[in-house]
Amino acid sequence: MLRWMGMAALAGATAATASVDTAPRPGGVYPLKPGIYVEKGVSCGTAPNVAIRQYDGRGISSAHSHACRVRILSRKGRRYDVSQSCIAAGMGPAPRFTERQMVTVTDALTFTLRMRGAGTTYRYCPVHMLPPGLRSAAR
């Protein structure tokens, strides 16, 4: 009986570690955890492309941009006024574009992005909560 309980506990521990997030620690341009972020109020598993952002430590990209690089213009506390340059395509070659942004980092897993008008808040999604097509991009 004891042996069976030990095996059951081990099986539970294995299942729990399967969902452990192995993404890098917070850091880079912003004190954010690199990975996939989804608009607050939207499910990680069913988010449409328009509600998804990816932080790679160098910039915040969308489904329609990549290779984003930030130049910090000013910083006041957790608010960053930046110029961000990205390639204007989800993948592959395309022209680079630049836009001004204000990024407010609430904590290592939450930020608000404002380009014009009101901002949009995004929260980090652990890899195990993402749809299969996004899991490889988040690693």
Image (tube, grey):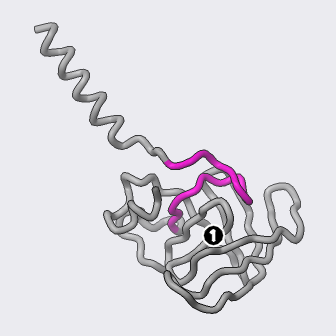
What's the residue at 47%, 44% (across, down)? 22
Residue that extends furthest to the top in the rendered view of this protein: 2
The three-letter code of the residue at mark 1 reads Ile
In the drawing, does residue 32 fall left or right of residue 123? Answer: right
In the drawing, does residue 1 fall left or right of residue 102? Answer: left
Magenta stretch, main secondary structure, is: loop
Q: Quadrant of residue 79?
A: bottom right
Q: Position of residue 96 (x, y in %)?
A: 67, 87
Q: Please state the extent of the stretch shown in magenta in the rendering.
A: 23-38
- Asked whether 85 falls inside the magenta stretch, the response is no
12, above or below 36, in the image: above
How many marks can you see?
Answer: 1
What's the residue at 62%, 83% (across, down)? 87
Residue with the mark numbered 1: 60
What crowding class fits label 1: few (fewer than 14 Cα within 10 Å), some (14-19), or many (20 or more)?
A: many
Q: Position of residue 127 (x, y in %)?
A: 42, 54
What's the residue at 71%, 80% (across, down)? 85
Q: Secondary structure at mark 1?
A: strand
The quadrant the N terminus occupies is top left
In the drawing, does residue 86 fall left or right of residue 52? Answer: right
Q: Position of residue 11 (x, y in %)?
A: 22, 28
Q: Which is nearer the eye, 121 or 65?
A: 65
